[in-house]
Amino acid sequence: MATYRVGIIGHTGRGNYGHDLDNVWLRIPGVDIVGVADADPTGLSKAVQRLGVTNGFADYREMLDRMQPDIVSVAPRWLDQHAAMITACADRGIHVFTEKPFCRSPAEADAIVQSCERHQVKLAIAFQTRYSPKLAIVRQLLEQGKIGDLIEIQARGKEDRRGGGEDLWVLGSHVLNLMNHFGGTPHWCHAEVRQSGRPMQMADVVEGNEGLGPLAGDIVHATFGLDNGIVGSFNSHRHAGAGSESRFGIRLLGSKGQIEMKTGLLPNAYLLADPFWSPGKSGIAWQPISSAGLGVEETRQDGGLIAGNVLACLDLLDAIEQDRHPEANMYEARTTVEMIAAVFHSHLSGNRVALPLTNRAWPLQQTT
């Protein structure tokens, strides 16, 4: 494998460096970190020391032009910067590993995809669960019919102080991507968003945290029509979470049982071979799922988010070498953004909306 030149874009105080999208490259063989950009002088100084580089830049465009990296981590968590940063890379033919959420609207996602396609750029997004070794086991169990026919997918966010619209963006991105992965293409969405005990109105819209843009809602109920008649749902209520052991994750409901799965590199995952979906009624016990199989003790250690990012970066390098799309790629990232936008389009129209959306704008953007 060739040695790749890697650049890092961060922004201290406005998303920082995400979940270690900078440090991850220190663990990847065959790469050389050639520069880092951060508009915050103090943050830049710390990043230069942390990453062991000599080239630090206040302007990421200058870094791209002077250092000419092959790959760039677009690391800030705040997504209002993502479209400009990613397209600046793609327009220069630079491959991208980006933090989630992807960007602020389907229109921004379209522009990113078009630039990447035009310049033959590979883009991977930090959906760490997609690189979990348990995911292959779950897919295998589905293919073996262990829960019968998949008929429904339930997803929830963390339902903490961010519950509702912010939860839909920040944590919903992960579980909506998993819904898309297991259930296929979303074809329609019907949703309700509530604020302070009533249906959300445009007057409720405020500027969201972390560069999310115009946002509202402390409760979200959304239903999606997926392939083969599968129905998916996402629900989030502010302050309704269960603490550190939250309900954040997905349930795959089948005609003969269900699989429950959290998120992360080695998420807790269990199978219930019970068509009633009720161990209290049937007396059937949940069976743990490990990276080695159903009911087999886990032998791997969970290295956290950075370990998931290591697998994502290795997959990106292989995608470049093999000229294929990364496992979690720009098309799936765009679908996730579109599903989120569809929730608000449906609520505001009072109707089910078809996907792909014809209106590519962010639905809560106020017009004058």
Image (cartoon, rainbow, N blue to C red):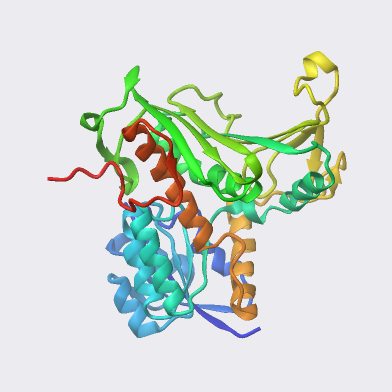
Figure check: 180 above or below 238: below
Front residue (pair 82, 39): 82
Q: Position of residue 10 (x, y in %)?
A: 38, 62
Q: Is residue 158 left or right of residue 302?
A: left
Q: Position of residue 253 (x, y in %)?
A: 70, 33
Outermost residue toward the left? 368
Q: Residue at the spot x=85%, y=46% of the render?
A: 144
Q: Residue at the spot x=34%, y=73% of the render?
A: 88
Figure check: 298 above or below 103: above
Label total for image: 0
Displayed quadrant of residue 354: top left
Q: Is residue 166 left or right of residue 139?
A: left
Figure check: 357 above or below 96: above
Q: Would you say residue 85 is visible in this rendering? A: yes
Figure check: 56 above or below 246: below
Q: Residue at the spot x=76%, y=35% of the render?
A: 270
Outermost residue toward the top? 281
Q: Position of residue 143 (x, y in %)?
A: 80, 48
Front residue (pair 106, 101): 106
Q: Position of residue 241 (x, y in %)?
A: 52, 25
Q: Quadrant of the C terminus?
A: top left
Q: Is residue 40 left or right of residue 67?
A: left
Q: Would you say residue 251 is visible in this rendering? A: no
Q: Quadrant of the N terminus?
A: bottom right
